[in-house]
Amino acid sequence: MQTARQKDDGDKAGINGGVLDRIDWSIVGAIVALAAFSYAATVLYKTLDSISWDQVRQTIVAFPTARLALAGLATAVSYLALVGYDLIALRLVGARRVPLRTTAITSFISHAVTFTFGFGVLTGGAVRMRLYRPWKVSTDQVLAVVLLCALSFWAGLAAIAGICLTLDPELVAALVGLNAATCRILGLAILAALAIWLAIATRKRTVIAIRDWQLPLPGAGTTLAAIFVGMADVAAAAAALWVLLPNDVAVTLPGFLVIFSLAIVVGVLSHVPGGFGVFDAIVLLGIAKGAPSPELVSSLLLFRLVYYFVPVTIAAMMLVAYEVRARSRISRDDSSQTAALFDSIIPPLAAVATFFGGLALLIAGTLPAERIAVVRNFIPLPFVEASHFIASLVGTILLVVANGLAHRLRSAWQLALLLLGGGAIFSVTKGFNFGEAFICLAAAGLLILGRKEFYRQGGVFAARPSASVLLAVGVAVGASAFIGLAIYRGIPYDNSLWWEFAYHQDASRFLRATLGAATIAIVIAAYQLMHKVAPERRNVSPSEMQDVEAIVRASTQITSELALIGDKRFLFSQSGDGFVMYDVRGSTWVAMGDPIANGSADLIDLVWRFKENADERRGSPVFYQVAADNLPVYLDAGFSLIKLGEDAWVDLEAFTLDGKVGRRLRQTRSRVERSNVSFEIVKAENVTKFFPALKRVSDAWLQVHGRREKGFSLGFWNEDYLGRHDVAVVRHDDRIVAFANILRKPVAATASLDLMRHVPDAPESVMDYLVVMLLEQMKAEGYKWFNLGMAPLSGLPEHRLASRWARFAGLFFRYGDRLYNFEGVRIFKSKFKPEWRPKYLAYEQSLRLPQTLLDIAGLISSSPQRVDAERQRHEV
């Protein structure tokens, strides 16, 4: 019959455990970015074939100071215009209380970091989160500010490109292979699109809504202001490079602005941090027509220095100074909440600083030693060679360790501190490179400042790198190799270069350092790919299990009996009187039900302890099937909630088979009993004798429905578990045809059933009969409530303004019968006139909700297999 299937499947909350084939667009983006960088590097290498590093260096040394000052002034104007982005965005999102000084500082720091390292939502968003939070700017508002700033930038860039394409299309036409008329039409189309946008903004204000998050788009006046601000930013940035260009470059200002805009667009779309290589290749191809001079290459390098390196260095120093001042105020205020607010930015900032330190060591390893004549008077050659090689290896490892710092790993903090200190020493001993040493020591100081924030357990490489991290590491190592190949291209290759050791053998040191860095990067990448980080599976000790059994016996929560199935781990409260039963799948830590607690204090303690325990191990905590009475506890702990369904609780004091109310159930009982059917409760001490007969029923039920056992949130065939409880059986002609185990809590006067099975040829309505008889028996024994289990996806709101989850789940409840008879479960349990009590899922990260549901489904479907495998291992 269908009812047994309904009960056994009911507690899995209607989650479909099938594996969804998805494209990881972050990996696709990383591959595209790496391909773009590789292509740009190849183009640059061929383009710069006739230029030597000595020529570029001499040009840089002799570069006029006045033109550098003009480039610095244009850079200052550009970053000043960037403040307008944040001013407009903050006004749109309603954060008007942020002072102008704070807005200016935040805008400068966030944009400097974003321009240099890319990944604006992560880098610039983290900085804004840190600096705007004291002014009550929420996380949603910060995300909206980041997106609105990007919108203003693209609008200004489009306006500049449209105007310049219309006025001077010849230069771009030659670059992209189109005729001038086509380019002018493209410029007019861009301007027309902006005009249409302004016309739409004039008529109505638009708000983009995603779930509960909203992005207010600007009106006509604000849009026009954003476009002008964006144009000023792009024009000033272009001017910073324009004044650095050689005098013999024959290109009009509108044409150069289009080339500059195109280079920015391609650089951004490539996702390469700072557009390194990609931006430069477009500029060289557009201006020099494939034949650049040493002066033009010097101009690009100086532009990188003036517009990127100097601002990000100043921004880093400002941010460190801000953190030091903030911490001094915290120590005076002695406010733990304020401390937590100020500490949140330390891990990502330390990760960026460490990555930057590794990049500095790596690139410095490719450059010729400038002070070698002085070094040879103080440091022996073996120390110089060893320091140069080790410094490059240290830089490569720091690039990877930075990912562990972003995940707050204590082991990564310890290793990074050691490597940064070593990097500073080797920078001095290889060539008196005090600039690199200062960068390493500054990053180490930041790590020491935020040492308490790196508390998570796990190995240095336990945190799997994202596609963006792998991209950044790949670009860093590739850029280092490219720079070295470009510098030493005039030296003919010979195998003897690998073994030549001398103070002036820079090319040999570059080859050895590059090979070592590439080997380290490949080994670490292979280790990360082949060693999938899995949560440690720790067996519950006999003494812990005894503690669990004692707590379960004393508990009034009927769900505590699920702790005895054998498929869960346990986290105990500080008092030792309660626990959280949970398991881990992937990075999802799933607690089954509310914590088993002796009071509200233990409940709160366990919720926070479980969250902290998951956080220390980089997990995402969720509580599956929690009761409505405890929702404030989860809300206070920062969880979000969605309704999973409703539990059916039968009030046994009101339950009756008499009169009109009980007529249908009374008729069902009478009809089944006329089929020579009997009901019996087998005591726990005698259940083992009936295992063969019960197992035949269970196997027949599974075979008919073509299903595997489920666990975690419900019982399965486990003789250790079944032998702990009384079992209700139904006989037909002295043969057991159906059974259900009984869970009891005499202290709370509540009872429930868990595992329900029947043979396919059992009399009709046998499961209705079993439940009726069980309810009568429990009522006779003095129990007040009986739990029939959860009806998944039932009781969700159907209003048109309900959440998307509620509306989607409601449709699935009504029309998903082919996958699971959700509505049938509700109908079956409604026969017994229950009181419906809602059950919820408490989770933290909205974007992980689909993955969380899949992980829960995976735990439910794989739990019995894990228990069987563990039992067989012990038997062997």
Image (tube, rainbow, N blue to C red):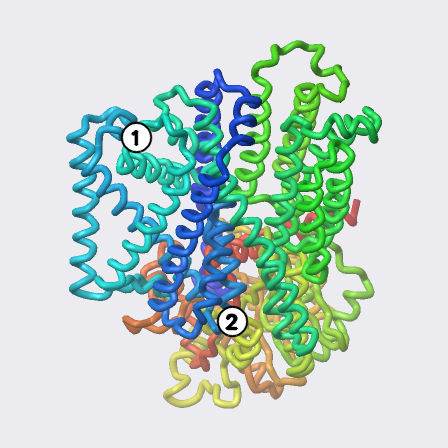
Res. 674 visible in picture? no
Q: In this view, does 109 lie above or below 725?
A: above
Please, what secondary structure does the residue beneath circle 2 have? Answer: strand
Tell me the number on the disc at residue 334.
none
Picture disc at residue 789:
2
379 relative position to 97: left or right: right
Vertical relation: 513 (above or below) 874: above
Marker count (numbered) = 2
Q: Where is residue 746 in the image (x, y as percent from the top left)?
A: 66, 83
- 722 lies above or below 573: above
**Which residue does the image show at 45% across and 69% down from the upper left?**
642
- Residue 767 is situated, as x and y percent measured from the top left of the image, at 48, 68
Q: Label 1: which residue?
A: 251
**Residue at (46% x, 51% y) in the render:** 120
Asked if residue 487 lies left or right of residue 765, the reply is right
- Quarter residue 333 falls in: bottom right
Percent x, y of residue 248: 36, 26
Q: Of helix, strand and loop, which one carries label 1?
A: loop
